[in-house]
Amino acid sequence: MGGEAGVVWGEGAAGRVPVGPLWGELRYGAELTRLLASREYRSVERRADAPPALLIPGFMAGDPSLTVLRGWLRRRGHRVRMSGIRTNVACAEVLVGRIEKRLRELADDAGEPVFLIGQSRGGALARSLAVRNPDHVAGLAMLGSPVADSLAVSSQVLRTVRWVAALGDIGVPGLFSSTCKDGACCAEFRAELAAPLPRGVRATAVYSRSDGIVDWRACVDPLADAVEVESSHCGMSVNLDVYRALDRALDLGR
C-alpha cells in the first residue's frame, strides 16, 4: 500500500485528511478480476519501440506486488526491471541510491532512457530519480503517490509510519527513522519532490477520489499530467483504467 513520500509527517495531519472509506480498499479483488477479464489487457498490442521500464512498489510492499503490471509491460514490448525492494520501509535516500544503480544499468544495457512507474511511495522515489537522472529517464508515471503533501494520509497509515520510524529509532536495520523527517539524510530527496521535472521528461500523476489511503489532492503533481480514475489505492497496479492511462503515457513517452 502507499504512505509517506519521504517520512515527512507531523502532528495535526492525522484525523483531518479527507480520504475515501478504508473499506473501499476491499475492491482490489474486483479490480483484478475486471482487468484479467478485459480484452484490452489480454490482447495488448506489442510495440516495437517500447522503452525499457523500471517498476517501484509502494510503502510496505515489495516487487511482487507489481507482478501483474510487469507481465503486461513485457507483453507490450518493454524490457522490464524491478526495483529490488522486498519491503518498502527503508530510508528514502538509501532506496533512491540503490534503485539509481538499477536505473543506470538498465538504460546503459538498453541503449536508451527508461520509463519509471511507481506506486504510492514508489512514485515519490521515481520522481526523485527522474530529477536526479534526467539523461536516463524517458518518462514517469506516479500511481496514487502523495508527492505534493506526504502528510495527507489516513490516520491508520500515519500510525503505521510512526511505528516503523520508532523501530528505526532504536536501531532495527533496514527501516527509516524519525530523523528522516527533517534530517540531512533525506534533504536531497525532499528537495527533489518539489523540484521542476527535467525538460523532456513527461510525467503522469494518476489519482482516485475514492482512494482509502491518501488524499487524492496530494497526488496531483502540478508539473505532471493529472489523470483521474475510479480505483482503490492498493488496486492501482491492477486497475483497468490505470492501465489505459499508462498505455497513453507510455506512448507519449517514446
Image (spheres, rainbow, N blue to C red):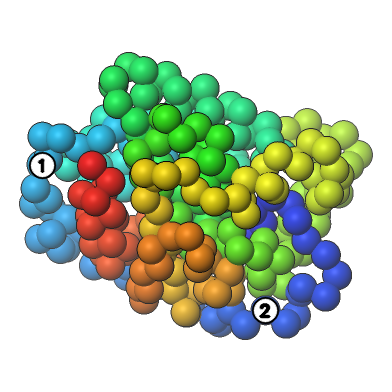
Is there a contact, CB below 8 Å, between mark 1 and mark 2? no
Dot 2 amino acid type: Val
**Tally of marks:** 2
The quarter of the rendered structure image containing the N terminus is bottom right
CA neighbours of label 1 inside 10 A, class few (<14), some (14 to 19), many (20+): some
Specify whether residue 7 is in view: yes
Residue placed most toward the observer, 96 or 136: 136
145 lies above or below 254: below
Could you tell which of marks 1 and 2 lies nearer the N-terminus? Answer: 2
Label 1 sits on residue: 46
Q: Quadrant of residue 31?
A: bottom left
Residue 216 as seen in the image, left or right of residue 192: left
Specify whether residue 60 is in view: no
Q: What is the CA distance from the residue labelled 1 to the residue labelled 2? A: 41 Å
Secondary structure of the residue carrying tag 1 is: loop
Which residue is depicted at the point 32% across and 17% down?
109
Label 2 sits on residue: 17
Residue placed most toward the observer, 102 or 191: 191
x then y, percent, for residue 4: 67, 56
Which residue is depicted at the point 86% across and 70% down?
11
Residue 236 as seen in the image, left or right of residue 71: right
Secondary structure of the residue carrying tag 2 is: loop
24 lies above or below 149: below
Which residue is depicted at the point 35% across and 73% down?
229
x then y, percent, for residue 32: 31, 62
x then y, percent, for residue 241: 28, 67
The quarter of the rendered structure image containing the C terminus is top left
